[in-house]
Structures are given as structure tokens and as C-alpha cells.
Image: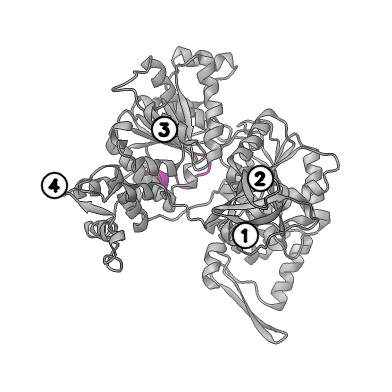
Amino acid sequence: MTTAAAPATLPPLFADWFAARGWAPRRHQLEMVAAGEAGSHALLVAPTGGGKTLAGFLPSLIDLAERGPKPATGPGSGVHTLYLSPLKALTTDVERNLMTPIREIGLNIHVETRTGDTKQSKRQRQRDFPPDILLTTPEQLALFCAWEGARSYFADLKCVVLDEVHAIWSGKRGDLLSLGLGRLQSFAPEMRRVGLSATIEDPDLIRGWLSPSPGVANVALVRGDPGAPAVIDVLISEGKVPWAGHTGQHAIPEVYAAIQRSTLALIFVNTRWQSEFVFQQLWAINDENLPIGLHHGSLAAEQRRKIEAAMARGDLRAVVCTSTLDLGIDWGDVDLVIQMAAPKGSSRLVQRIGRANHRLDEPSRALLVPASRFEMLECQAAREAVADNAFDWEPVHIGTLDTLAQHVMGVACSEPFDMQVLYDEITGCGPYRALTWEQFEEVVDFVATGGYALRTYDRFARIVRTPNGRWKVRNQHIAQRHRMNVGAIVSAGTLNVRVASRRGGASRQLIGGRKVGEAEEWYFEQLTPGDTFQFAGQTWAFQGITGTDALVTHANDSDPKIPSWGGSKFPLSTSLADRVRTMIHDRDHWRVLPPDVQEWLELQETRSVIPDAESMLVETFPRGSRHFLVAYPFEGNLAHTTLC
């Protein structure tokens, strides 16, 4: 195992800043500085609150401080450090926290963010005048790879920092990110790769993915000291756990009481539908008018920024949120995390718990609220996994060919490519090291012709061969279409939800105004004008669809519907499913469960059977004039849907 070099010492400018704040740099922060001085790639695994993000940036800040004034043009005038986060909210939070040492030390370092919410004028300015440090997302990196002039834009790149790398390395987003890193490495061969995470079960898997060459020897592993163990309680509402359900509605009064006892509570839920539901339920009993916010990915960017700013100021007592706030974000005064329904994975639970206190030496407090008796099993299994410091594990992932086809298309949009050179670049990327030349040729042919099924259609001929044997995009229209659709996140078509107003007073025509957020098109297809629904914490009346906008007006209704989003369900992680299987098969383990949950398991054993860890239980029974079949794979939503 390769570990970091001996800890370095900080330059006086930075050592004085730490001392002025009454801090001492942590060992892992100094080891990351040493890795930077050695020009080594690095993976930092450290608990929440240990200063991971600062550790990742310290080598860059030191290098930029020693650089002096930035040249206006030429070598050294481009982006020095690229920071990639799986969440847009995280880039905003990191910018705020990163500016603190830059401002207080007095460094002449320019930092900017770039996400899907960034205005076009600012994006253009960033192309013309690159910041020293650019904070962005993996999807934006895929777009960078499809830019004309990307090679010269990133020629000065010295470091890429991948935050919360555990959340993105596996799967198609990770494939596309790895290919993007390979592209950047070809632009800037001396570029360092730095990964940050608090919840990695097998660091060598991530190191192999992070490395630009086979093996892990050139990626230093830096481990932070363990933090204080979290305090995790499970709420048993009125001493009972419901038979079924998934909302946790039965526990809303007790959740509200917990908010009253806290300074700032984050209430995590697993879906956007549930966030709207829980927010509404809390407001219905909010007799003390506590300031409670709502945050999820389908709200308008302006609304999300408003909530984030209010949290940073300490103006809120609670925020109901989804995974948009569960990675790395430091909101200071959060002293309690409430997980409504099962967390579906131990790593996700650790990340969410880490939002409380966000300090290494103080225990975080969390309250789990199981929505049903089966979720009680999941909550207990997750609680025990956290106590054992056991994180969710991922299997070895082989890069997907459809993701590779997208990357090949992006490269052709940026510049003509030579097949052999691009093949060598791609096989240097972790997920594609086993890619054969024949597979690569088939992918290029698919991008060039649409494959055997579509090659007769001219519009699927996206790239063409130049006289010198290179491949380039066929025309700028195709390039623009690709750039508008980059990324590996699959989502249904959405409509902008806009507040409607009437044009010209007496006219009956409605026009769209302020954007409230987005919801999926199929949802509005089920509504008729006048139907009411709950969204962004308010009640709206649907008026109709104009273009890509769903027009709404304010309404009052005691029983509005709530939109649902098709891609928002979390699967039960494989490792947590294994723990649940083990728990239900071990009768001695039942003693840690509430009496009514034990009774439920005993009833299951009496009427049917408790499946062992290697079996899948299938039950059939008649009810009325029908026969029903129930399967219990204990493998999570993604596996279960294949049985439907």
C-alpha cells in the first residue's frame, strides 16, 4: 500500500493564518501538502469535520500564493485547479468556505463556480478570462471536453480535486468523469488528481479508478484520524412501529418536538415527493411559526440559493431536504439530523449524519424515523453498520460502451482525433483498461454511422473522416446538439413550473412569469385546469401548458395533490441488504428490535417462513377472486423492478 510522504510544513503565510484562528493543521492536511509538493496523485479518506476540502485545496493555494500575480495571457493565465462535485449546492458552499482563507490571508486568487444554474454571460466570461480555481460538476467537465479550444483552455491545469468521490466513481457518471479526467491529462500531462471522501470501504478500488495508469502505486493514500462516534437514536413513535407505509406521517408531532429542542435540524427524506409531503405536514402543526425551509433539486435555483443563504445566516430552525444537501456541505449551526424513513445505505447515513456539528472532535446527533416495521430492520442495520465503521461497498465496475460513445462524440466536437491516440488515452482510464481495439472500432463506427440498424439514415452520421485520417464532427449543428445533451444522468422530460399572469388585463390569455421549479411532463398530463397540487411549499392551481411551461396560479385547497418524480427512488444498498438478511435470520439478533417488530417477525415465521441469506422467499395467496404473488429478494428497488 502506498501512503503519503512524511508531513510537510506550511509556509509562514499559511502557518500564521492557522495560528491566528487558534488552529493547528491536522496531520492529514500536512500529508496532502507533502503529496502536492511531490507531484503525486492522492486519495484522502477522512471523517466529516476533519477539514478534507481545505486539505485538498492547500497545495493549490500554496502554489498560487508563490506564483505571484497572474499573467493576463500566455502560460500561467489559465485554470490552475479544477474542483468537481457531484452536487451543485456543494460547489456554492465550497466557494464560500474557500474564500475565507483566501480573503483573510490576502491571497490574489480568483475563484468562481460553474454549474447548470450559471448564467450564460458568466459562462462566456469564464471562457474569455479563466479563474485560478474553477468549481464545477462532472456534467460541466463533459461539456468542457466538447469545447472547441478545450486543449489550450486547460493547458495550465495543475490539479483536479474530486470531492465525495465515493458517490460518483461507480456507474455511468463515474465512467464519463474518468474519461474526462483522461482527456484533461492529455491536455496537461503533469496534472495531479486528488480524491476526497469520508466513506470509502475499499480505498484501493477508488485509487485504481483515480490512477491514470494501471495499479495504485502512483496514488498516495492519506487517512485522517477518526472522529468522535456519532450518537444515533431510533424514534419509536408512541412505543409502536407501523405495519406499513413509507412517509413517516405517524411521527410528525415527535419530529416537530425534536425541531423545537434543536438550534437547526436537517430533516432528510429520500424523494422529492416526500420532501413536499413532510414539509406540508410540519407546517400544518407549526403553531409556534418556526422558520422551516424546503430544499430539493426540482426547485428553482433562486429558491434553493435563498434557503442556503438563510441556513448560513442562522435564520432557520429546520430544513426538509433530499440528497441535494447530504454531501460535504458545512452549514455550521446544524445540531441534529433527522432521517425520515430508512436511509437505504450506511454510507449515505454517515454523510447525512455528518451535517450535524460538522466538527471532527464533537459527536454528531441523528434521529432515525422508521416509517414501517420493515424499515425498522433497515434503520437498525444501518445504525449497526455505522457503529462498525462499515460503509457500503461497490463491485468492480467495467465502463459502459454507450458512455464511451458519448465521450467519443464530445472529443470530435472539440477537435479532430486520431483513433490510435484516442484509444491509448481511453485505455488509460480505470473503467476502460480492458477495452479491446475491436470494441473501440465498433463504438467509433456507431458514432459515425448509427450502427447497423441506423446507418441508412443520414442524420445519424455524426462524425466524418478527414483526408488525413482523423475524425471530426460532421457540422456545427450536430456539435451544438451534443453539447446541449451531455451527461449520464437520465431523467424524464420536464416542464418549467411558472406563476401565470394575464396578458393585457381583460384578455383571457395567460403568460408565464416567475419560475418556481420543474416537474415531469407526464405528471401534468394527468391534470386538468383547476386541479391543485403542492409544490415548493405552496398550493397551486394548474392552468395549462404553454410550450415548455406549466402555468400555475396561487390557490387554497385543504387536500392538494403532490407531484411525484420518476427518477427519485433510492435502492437499498447491497451491503445493507446483506445486513438485513443476516438480522432476520438470526433470532438472537431480534432482541435489539422493539417488541412489536419482534412479534411481526414471529408471526411471519409462524404463518410462512423466514428466508435464509441465500434464499428468496416467494409467497402466493388468494384474496377474493384473485391470486397474488409476493417476492422478497431483499435487494433493493433496482433489483425488484426487474421482477415486475
Amino acid under disc 3: Gln
Q: How far across and down, in percent of the image, does residue 282 sit?
A: 78, 47
Residue 124 numbered tag: 3
How crowded pointer 1 is (Cα within 10 Å; few <14, some 14-19, many 20+) is rated as some
Amino acid under disc 4: Asn
| Residue topped by disc 1 | 524
Q: Is residue 464 above or below residue 306?
A: below
How crowded pointer 2 is (Cα within 10 Å; few <14, some 14-19, many 20+) is rated as few
Q: The C terminus lies in which quarter of the figure?
A: bottom right
* First-in-chain label (2 vs 1): 2
Q: Is residue 348 above or below residue 560?
A: above
Let me know if residue 197 is in the magenta part.
yes
Q: How far across and down, in percent of the image, does residue 79 sit?
A: 37, 28
Q: Is residue 220 above or below residue 598?
A: above
* First-in-chain label (2 vs 4): 4
Residue found at x 54% / y 16%? 104
Find out whether the residues at labels 1 and 3 contact each other: C-beta distance under 8 Å.
no
Find out whether the residues at labels 2 and 1 contact each other: C-beta distance under 8 Å.
no
| C-alpha gap between disc 4 and disc 1 | 52 Å
| C-alpha gap between disc 2 and disc 4 | 61 Å
Q: Nearer the viewer, residue 254 or 359?
A: 254
| Residue topped by disc 2 | 504
Left/right placement of residue 257 relative to residue 4 reads right
Q: Is residue 458 visible?
A: yes
Q: Nearer the viewer, mark 4 or mark 1?
A: 1
| C-alpha gap between disc 2 and disc 3 | 36 Å
Left/right placement of residue 524 relative to residue 134 reads right
* First-in-chain label (4 vs 1): 4
Residue found at x 34% / y 23%? 77
Q: Is residue 428 visible?
A: no
* First-in-chain label (4 vs 3): 3
Q: Secondary structure at mark 1?
A: helix
